């Protein structure tokens, strides 16, 4: 059996369904191929369920601090983990249902369930069927990396997907990886009552950030009782009478950590290994990411790659922007490019970290002479009033042009306040322009103009 389409979209993540909507509205006959769940990582195992989990953990944490606000809670705080998990899954299920309803209502769009594999640059096999199109768009996403640690095959371990199915609070959760995904889960389960140890091979957590950000985050999490084992080489596992023994070779601390559960949070990899890229002549890098140019075109005419599988961004917002770039260039005669967007992201611990552009170390490495403005949250009225005055705000500015190079907001509302800096950068505004802007009081972001007016050489 064979069917021909005007376009094939492989993967129903953040970019895929949106592109199907634009293409079908333009009169194209479109096939959307999905082998698992519509909605991709964000809807099913990423942003939506994890932030629902973080919200439950925040509620538990706030209830435990109620007396700080003069609110008396009688008796201990109990965690109904099955109910927490049911709520998390409900959030994901409802969002997935909305995507399914949306796709099902698209004219000219056929949803094909199954695993797509290239037969040629314009042909794919899905199950027993062949489909063809002059335009093929890959949006196949990624999954957790599972390193070949010694002993890993002899234990039960969790990934960011399977941990969302837990209906019990781990006695002792060992998190392998001190970066964004690992830290969010570490804090959430600590707030549910688990003992938590984070094991990181590097000398500090979230190594992508400036050292002051890493240090502040670790201090915040340590205050909540999370233990850290840094410089952890030779990570290995073995069964133990009390659960799982995680062997670590560190400069300090015992050579083993005994836990009940292990979460692997050491990175992501693209779902490209079984797509038959060679049959289409598609180029990929050593990690399996499909090679694309700034217009998201592959080396094969008529094939594009969007989202986590192209190595040009690993976030829901970058995946959606990939769709916008491809659609605008293909249907609107535009010339939009990936290189035009600013790197921005959040770490959704509590308090959250919002980041955009360059950090201090990156800016100096690129040869910029910089000025930096910094303000601790202890001097931000809104943070103090909320009883959440941890973290700081920072702006990095080019000393010669006065253009804002980047910023970080670690504190209450940091994931929202960072957009002030992002928008100023996107529109080419200077630090002086920000300093002259009047913000609403009392807010966290009202201090950003003040910081922009207090820049010092760094």
Image (tube, rainbow, N blue to C red):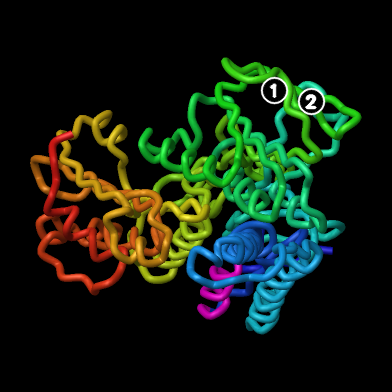
Quarter of the image for the N terminus: give it.
bottom right
Q: Residue 130: which quarter of the image?
A: bottom right
Judged from the image, the secondary structure of the residue bearing numbered disc 2 is: strand
Give the magenta range.
12-26
Question: Eyeballing the image, is 231 above or below 156?
Answer: above
Front residue of this view, candidates 235 and 30: 235
Q: Residue 425: which quarter of the image?
A: bottom left
Q: Is residue 96 left or right of residue 387?
A: right
Quarter of the image for the C terminus: give it.
top left
Query: Among all residues in the image, which is located at the extreme right?
Result: 241
Residue 320 is situated, as x and y percent measured from the top left of the image, at 49, 63
Residue 239 is situated, as x and y percent measured from the top left of the image, at 87, 28
List the residue tagged with mark 1.
235
Q: Is residue 100 left or right of residue 418?
A: right
List the residue tagged with mark 2.
237
Using a 10 Å C-alpha cutoff, classify the residue at mark 1 as few (fewer than 14 neighbours), some (14 to 19) or many (20 or more): many
Instruction: Determine the residue positioned at 87% across, 58% down.
Output: 128
Q: Is residue 174 left or right of residue 17?
A: right
Residue 163 is situated, as x and y percent measured from the top left of the image, at 75, 51
Q: Does residue 13 show up magenta in the picture?
A: yes
Judged from the image, the secondary structure of the residue bearing numbered disc 1 is: strand
Residue 118 is situated, as x and y percent measured from the top left of the image, at 71, 48
| C-beta proximity under 8 Å, tags 1 and 2 | yes
State the separation of the CA atoms marked 1 and 2. Answer: 7 Å
């Amino acid at each position: 059996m064979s069917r021909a389409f005007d376009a094939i979209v492989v993967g129903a993540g953040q970019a895929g369904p949106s592109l199907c909507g634009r293409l079908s509205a333009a009169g194209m006959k479109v096939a959307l191929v999905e082998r698992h769940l519509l909605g991709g990582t964000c809807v099913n195992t990423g942003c939506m369920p994890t932030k629902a989990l973080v919200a439950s953990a925040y509620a538990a944490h706030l209830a435990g601090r109620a007396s700080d606000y003069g609110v008396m809670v009688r008796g201990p705080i109990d965690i109904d983990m099955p109910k927490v998990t049911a709520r998390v899954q409900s959030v994901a299920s409802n969002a997935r249902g909305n995507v399914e309803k949306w796709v099902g209502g698209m004219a000219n769009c056929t949803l094909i369930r199954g695993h797509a594999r290239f037969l040629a640059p314009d042909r794919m096999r899905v199950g027993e069927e062949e489909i063809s199109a002059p335009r093929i768009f890959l949006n196949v996403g990624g999954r957790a990396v599972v390193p070949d640690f010694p002993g890993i095959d002899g234990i039960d371990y969790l990934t960011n997907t399977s941990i969302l199915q837990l209906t019990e609070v781990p006695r002792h959760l060992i998190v392998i990886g001190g970066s964004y995904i690992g830290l969010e889960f570490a804090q959430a389960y600590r707030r549910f009552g688990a003992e938590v140890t984070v094991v990181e091979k590097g000398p500090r957590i979230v190594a992508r950030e400036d050292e002051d950000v890493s240090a502040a985050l670790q201090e915040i999490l340590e205050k909540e009782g999370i233990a850290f084992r840094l410089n952890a080489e030779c990570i290995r596992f073995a069964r133990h009478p009390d659960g799982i023994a995680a062997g670590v070779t560190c400069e300090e601390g015992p050579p083993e950590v005994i836990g009940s559960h292990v979460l692997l949070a050491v990175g992501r990899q693209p779902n490209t290994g079984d797509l038959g890229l060679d049959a289409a002549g598609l180029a990929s890098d050593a990690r399996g990411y499909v090679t694309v140019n700034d217009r998201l075109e592959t080396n094969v005419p008529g094939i594009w790659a969007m989202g986590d599988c192209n190595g040009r961004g690993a976030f829901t917002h970058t995946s959606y922007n990939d769709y916008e770039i491809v659609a605008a260039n293909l249907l609107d005669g535009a010339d939009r490019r990936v290189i035009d967007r600013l790197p921005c992201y959040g770490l959704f611990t509590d308090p959250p970290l919002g980041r955009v552009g360059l950090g201090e170390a990156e800016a100096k490495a690129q040869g910029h002479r910089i000025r930096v403005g910094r303000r601790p949250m202890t001097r931000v009225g809104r943070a103090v009033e909320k009883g959440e005055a941890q973290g700081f705000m920072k702006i990095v500015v080019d000393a010669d042009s006065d253009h804002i190079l980047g910023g970080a907001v670690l504190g209450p509302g940091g994931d929202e306040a960072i957009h002030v800096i992002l928008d100023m950068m996107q529109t080419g505004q200077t630090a002086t322009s920000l300093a002259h802007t009047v913000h609403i009081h009392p807010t966290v972001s009202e201090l950003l103009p003040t910081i922009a007016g207090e820049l010092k050489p760094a």
